[in-house]
Image (cartoon, grey):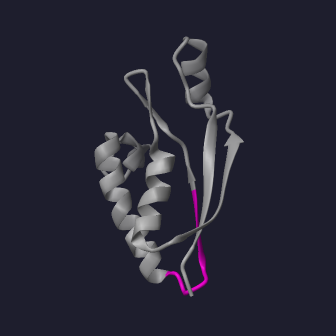
Amino acid sequence: MFEDYLGTDKNFGRLKPFQYNQRMLNVYRLCLQSIRPGGTLTIIIQDMMKGGKREPLSEWAMSSCLRMGFELSDWFKRYSPGTGYKQERRKKGYKVIENEDIIILRKPE
């Protein structure tokens, strides 16, 4: 079942950063509509590596949500050792992202 999901369009992580961001805009809009005033949205996100360069998804997500009307409540970075896939990439000498962001946003009252 999970393997079926990995190769589908529903797996946003397989998209190029621009396409990923466009799809996530819709997700964040729906969250804003469905969260009650004063409620929170917590995003756990990790930047991507594409072509050996870091694609900053975290800053984009936070700034997009702020433009939509969310307010920033808190933002943390934490070490993320990753999955077996990440560990294999690291062993082969590829650059990997070692941290992830936890962004907590609030819908204004």
* Residue 37 located within the stretch drawn in magenta: yes
Residue at point 41%, 44% (across, down): 13
Q: Closer to the camera, 96 or 59?
A: 59
Please state which of residues 55 and 12 is positioned toward the viewer in this rendering: 55
Q: Quadrant of residue 105?
A: bottom right
Q: Residue at x 54, y 78 (%)?
A: 107
Asked if residue 81 can be seen in this view, the reply is: yes
> Left or right of 1: which side holds 83?
right
- What residue sits 67% from the left and 45% below the top? 77
**Vertically, is 62 above or below 4?**
below
Where residue 23 sits, quadrant-wise, is bottom left
Q: Position of residue 80 (x, y in %)?
A: 67, 38
Q: Is residue 79 left or right of residue 64?
A: right
Task: Determine if residue 1 is in view.
Answer: no
Q: Is residue 22 above or below residue 48?
A: below
Percent coordinates x, y for residue 48 in the rendering:
46, 36
Split into 4 quadrants, where in the image is the C terminus? bottom right
User: Is 95 placed above or below 105 here?
Assistant: above
Horizontal arrangement in the rendering, residue 91 relative to residue 56 (left or right):
right
Q: Position of residue 108 (x, y in %)?
A: 55, 82
Q: Nearer the viewer, residue 73 or 81?
A: 73
The residue positioned 38% from the left and 58% from the top of the image is 24
Q: How many marks?
A: 0
Q: Which residues are magenta?
A: 35-43
- Horizontal side of residue 67 vs 109, given as left or right: left
Q: Position of residue 18 (x, y in %)?
A: 30, 45
- Name the residue nearer the viewer: 102 or 75: 75
